[in-house]
Amino acid sequence: MNLEGYSLLSILKEIERGSINAEDVNDFYYKKSLQLNDKINAYITLLKPDDKKINGNLKGIALAIKDNISTKGIKTTCASKMLESYVPPYDATAVSKLKEQGGRILGKTNMDEFAMGSSGENSAFGPTRNPLNNDYVTGGSSSGSAAAVAANMAPISLGSDTGGSVRAPASFTGIVGFKPSYGAVSRYGLIAYANSLEVIGILGKYTKDVKFLFKLIAGKDPLDSTSLNVELNEKEQFKPKILVIKSFVELSKDEVKKEFYRSISKIDEEGFEVKFIDSFSLTEYLLSAYYTIACAEASTNLSRYDGIRYGPKVESTGNWRDYITKARSFFGPEVKARIMMGTFILSAGYYETYYLRALQLRKLIRQEFEKIVRGYDALYIPTMPVLPWRIGEAIEDPKMAYASDVLTVLPNLTGSPALSLPVGRIREFFVGGQLIGLRGDDIKVLKIAEMMEEILKVKNDGRN
Amino acid sequence: MEEIKVGLEVHVQLVTLKTKLFCSCSSDYRGKPPNVNICPVCTGLPGSMPTLNKRAVEEALKVVFMLNAQPYATSYFFRKTYFYPDLPKNFQITQYDKAGGYPLAHDGSLKLTNGKVVRIERIHLEEDPGRIYYEGSRATAKYSLIDYNRSGIALIEIVTAPDMSSAEEARDFVERLTTILSDVGINVRDYEGALRVDVNVSYAGGERVEVKNVTGAASVEKAVVYEVFRQKTMHEKGIKVVRETRAWDEKRRITIGSRGKEFEEEYRYMPEPDLPPVIITEALMQKVKDEIGGSQEERYNEIVNDGINEELAKKISSDKQLYSVYEKVKFYEPTLKQLAANVLANEISYLMKRYSVKSLPDDVSGLVEILQNYRSIPDHDTAVDYLKKWVEGEKVKVSLQATSVNEIHDDVVKVVAENYDKIKNLEYTKKFEFLMGILIRKFGKENKKVLVEELTKVLSETR
């Protein structure tokens, strides 16, 4: 059986009809993963699905889970030496919801260590390779979750998005990546990098699959006080009103820009109402606000890794301070750098200068965003202003690196739902377009993406 | 004697709670095998998140009201970061009054047995760390063993102003506080280690020294005695006392300086992003105030046991607010309980009805002032006026002229007697001027009229 190009929903339909069973489906993805993982490095842990029959919405299908989402009894490493052998005694709420609805775990996917990075190269277990061209990066930090879906190593996957970590790799691998509204999916069990910015997201080949899975894991969780119920009912068909901020598009490379504008004319032709404005006034502050908040939260979140209750075994000298210092040397260089920055930001005398200001900026950015986007169904900008680069090769133009983050951090600062979908092709790669809605408008954003998918017909079905 | 200043930070476990502050683990950890009441949250496992135990806020508010403190409508949790093996996340979730934060409550007070009022600066909620256990002694133990059963137990921290000026007062504060806590069911006496105090002592205007982790009122007294002795000795030898944190050695009854390098405390406070602000609504405050009283029958029995007649007891016990005020007045001035019962059952309940007053003030000090001077208030209408002021939440100061003509008479007699030798040979006007000078200094110009009358009377009697 070859399931390449199948959507999750069509697989479930086939199982319902009795033409295939879950065991065969799981076997297909498992074998494909065994065959490709040496090359792609999408999985840190791959599990052979058992053949026990399970009912429920997911009918026993096995999915890929990013390795910073806690899975009971299965190693959850955050792609770090620090948690190389850590086995959580509990499931994240999103995972237990999937299990309750008949889902299985196919494996835990590779990522940038502790979700810090946007190329998928910062993993203690080696970089994830882009299925579209193995010499290129997948984008990160949910690199393995994107690569697994793009390479038919999983039907769908969970990732996490703190500043673009679901959308960036989705864009680089030509699939759909959805970052829900802040709080729409419980974070309980998601190993924290920056609590006030991040959320669990979904990566799939088709928007309808992503929407289906989102509905299964969304909702308020008593274990996460910041979670909430967003509207899950779908509106009737509507004519989307889309806003484009030109200065954001202009940050992109010419070939990306060309493909992006081409997608706009197509949706325009099909009846979307598209309006352009010149710029977003707080653009220059987006990255500073984002990195200040993220690093500050990270530095306290990651202080718990001291090798005492779990983590690396360290030779003791009889002094606990030495012990903790030694244990904490197991972090990779990017993680250490962000802990250092966060520690500095929260130090006496700098808190007001940096952290409080960043919080105030976030508030202003939210207000500005809501003012601009209210009255429209979504903002539409490119996801990544560049195409994937070669593994190991730093981006040549540092301005491009800066811009590449600018386009994805905005919805994390505003708590908005955001989705990246393939909207154009360049050589073997894809150009990702990003839809950003007002917080709570998750279903609306997914709905617009479905309409665009149908119009644009740009699809990585894994058969390239 | 040189000035001694003592301020306390009292940590109280909310022992009435069945579960911990941020998870549903049992809070019953005493006598249990190590690490049985634990879960991902209270051991800080990766990915776990705290959720606030709402009962903890209610129990803490009981203490807030008993200490006449004011809750903030919105308060926040913060992360206080420091590395220590008994702290599983290496940060403690607590409340903070700087960096844009507000604690649970502020500006309370507690009156000592000697009548002095100790100001309470703030009261906040926080989590208890785990415990480190050494086989044998700390020096000889091969390992440090950590028990996380206590980790995440709900604490309130009560921070006083440096208003105590002796070891006895510090002890008295802790004892009075213990009684107040047991009035709302928090019987810290029954639980070892449920009340722990950080004692701040400064001598003769010198630097403040903090003695950490002193358990119980008696030890607090001993710690202050030792620390005053130590600082005084240094002072006399001309050695400067440095600002530092010291440990209390219960066995040797001394404080020990922390060994190793001194470095400035740097806790890198930041708001806890996983917890929403704590919102105190009017409804919640009313609910807690209602809970403070217990059942009507219990209230009735308690009042009757105080020797109050059944009719008054019935009236007071039927209204939780009247009862709560009665209890507070009794706590501050036990001798006033009979008078308080009369006034509450009659004048105050009349005033509440007449002016549709829904809630009585938390602070009873104004009422106590009225009751203490009750007999000196010239007539019933004036007394009711004073009571009305208190009921409506105004500041009450019973003015001396109206209060105590009798007292003034006694004092004038006393002043005349004390100065008899000096005045006996003076002529009447000189005598009168001299004595008036003393009396005005003592009672103030506003009482001049009464004083002239009384002095004239007294001098005519002694002639």
Image (spheres, coloured by chain):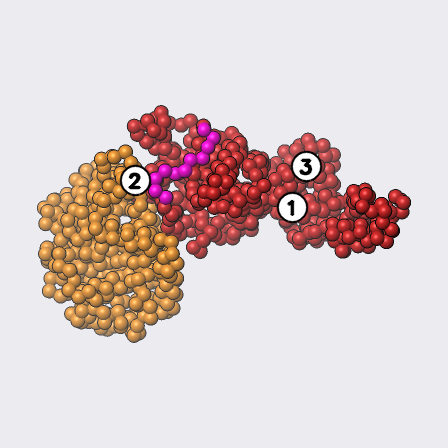
Chain colours: A orange, B red
Q: Quadrant of the C terminus of chain B?
A: top right
The tag on residue A241 is none
Q: Is residue B257 magenta?
A: yes
SS for tag 1? loop
The alpha-carbon separation of the residues under discs 3 and 2 comes to 53 Å
The alpha-carbon separation of the residues under discs 3 and 1 comes to 14 Å
Out of B95 and B4, give the one closest to the viewer. Answer: B4
User: Is residue B406 found left or right of A256 in the rendered image?
Assistant: right
Please give the range of residues in magenta: B252-262
Q: Is residue A104 visible?
A: no
Residue at 32% x, 48% y is A301
User: Is residue A223 found left or right of B192 in the rendered image?
Assistant: left
Residue A177 lies in quadrant: bottom left
Q: Please, what is the three-letter code of the amino acid marked with disc 2?
A: Arg
Give the chain letter at badge 2: A
Reading the image, the residue beneath label 3 is B334
Give the chain letter at badge 3: B
SS for tag 2? helix
User: Is residue B408 found left or right of B89 in the rendered image?
Assistant: right
Q: Main secondary structure of the magenta part?
A: loop
Reading the image, the residue beneath label 2 is A321
Q: Earlier in the sequence, mark 3 or mark 1?
A: 3
Residue B175 lies in quadrant: top right
Please state which of the two labelled residues, at mark 3 or mark 2, is closer to the viewer: 2
Spot occupied by residue A51 in the image (x, y as percentages of width and height) = 19, 38
Spot occupied by residue B404 in the image (x, y as percentages of width and height) = 78, 47
The tag on residue B364 is 1
